[in-house]
Image (spheres, rainbow, N blue to C red):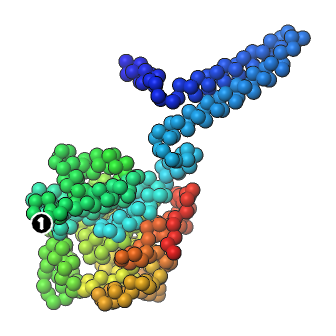
Amino acid sequence: MNYWRELRTWALPGMRIKRWIALTLLGISSINAAVGLEAIDLLRPGTHLFGGAIAALGLGIIGVAVGLHRLLHVVAETLQPDTNLAEAMFNARTLRRGPKIVAIGGGTGLSTLLRGLKEYSDNITAIVTVADDGGSSGRLRQELGVLPPGDIRNCLTALAREERLLTELFSFRFPGATGLGGHSFGNLFLAAMTGISGDLMQAIQRSSAVLAVRGQVVPATMAQMTLFARFDNGEVVRGESGITAERRPIIDMWCDPAQPVALPEAVRAILEADAIILGPGSLYTSLVPHLLIPGLRDALLASRAPRIYVCNVMTQPGETDGFRASDHVRVLQRFGGAGVCQHVLVNEALPRRLRERYESQGQFPVELDWEALVEQGVSPVRGAFIDEAEVVRHNSSLLAAAIMTWVEAISPGRAHTARLVAPAVPE
């Protein structure tokens, strides 16, 4: 019964396909007629049907070619307006065959990376920290008992097909200081979906379907994870937002619960990955929290996939004052083990326009100390990967292109870098 209903739908006026289906069928009939005329001519010599067979064959081929071309054009125009069909098919097929890439982190750094990587593969898994306790995410966590949705929201919009509009919508914050004031629409959307689904993972999966997300986003753990840090003055501070606000050198970090259970989907993605990327993101509050989860830490060390750490562009006041690239790696190795990463990507392009402003705030470019990295057993990958707009951060296209070049060099049998359009390079 559903079959006949669908058939009637195709026959409705205004579909703009019936004429092209008819032309295609007429073309096929003409080709069949040509074959029949040629058969008669062969069986009955002297009938002189060869010329008619050639004409029928030519008309049939033209009819089939035009009919199929216009039919495919109408379908493609309906599904993806203003899109070249060949390009869309090529990109869809190559993206589905892209490498399995796992990106681990949080904050704006992870979403920046994902925004570029989605142009190379549909097989991306973003593993997001859930230790955030500030702003809208912190309020929803405290009032509703949900995991903080902020970083998850940023990753979903970064991987969405229609990214620009969704980013604006999901990032919209309600004005005011009470009630909805300060909450972003995306955070409320995820909180509502969690309430409807009864589970954050179900909410993420349903939201991903609505947003046409390329890849998947998974939280590192379903535990209500709280960070603790001990600073150089002996003071212990609780909570991610409090740690960030302290702006002092960190001596040690731990979490409550002491051994949060890693999400099975996150562990599976790491073990099945073709390449694993750590960062970019705040060293102590976006990356170290993942390494405090035993299941994720063990999976990273057990994975056969090459692992690269994307080092921050600038130091963070207090937390990483004077840190060079090797100092960042040292912290990761302390919490994740010596094999947590085999490569480190470091930006060498110095900011120009915003340099004085950053220096006045105590932030400086992270220095590439090549020999120290090699002594740590880490291979450096260097280049120019930054944007300078209102802030200095990684350029998503340049960063993704560098990552994919690295993936291809490390595992040429599984890498995928084919694109029809090259990534934009800032002037």
- Residue under the point 29% across and 87% down: 361
Q: Nearer the viewer, residue 302 or 235?
A: 235
Q: Secondary structure at mark 1?
A: loop
Q: Nearer the viewer, residue 3 or 312?
A: 3
Q: Is residue 136 left or right of residue 104?
A: left
Q: Is residue 318 left or right of residue 167?
A: left
The residue beneath circle 1 is 177
The correct choice, above or below, for 401 with respect to 35 in the image is below
Q: Is residue 379 left or right of residue 294?
A: right
Residue type beneath disc 1? Ala
Could you tell me which quadrant the N terminus lies in? Answer: top left
Asked if residue 272 shows in the view, the reply is no
Q: Nearer the viewer, residue 240 or 211?
A: 211
| Whole-percent x, y for residue 359 in the image | 34, 89
Which picture quadrant has residue 25? top right
| Whole-percent x, y for residue 374 in the image | 46, 83
Asked if residue 120 shows in the view, the reply is yes
- Residue under the point 38% across and 78% down: 392
- Residue under the point 29% across and 49% down: 207
| Whole-percent x, y for residue 175 in the image | 17, 63
Which picture quadrant has residue 321? bottom left
The correct choice, above or below, for 12 with respect to 155 in the image is above
**Dot 1: few (<14), some (14–19), or many (≥20) neighbours within 10 Å?**
few
| Whole-percent x, y for residue 81 in the image | 48, 44
- Residue under the point 43% across and 75% down: 387
Which picture quadrant has residue 53? top right
Can you name the residue that lies furthest to the right here? Answer: 46
The correct choice, above or below, for 41 with respect to 82 in the image is above
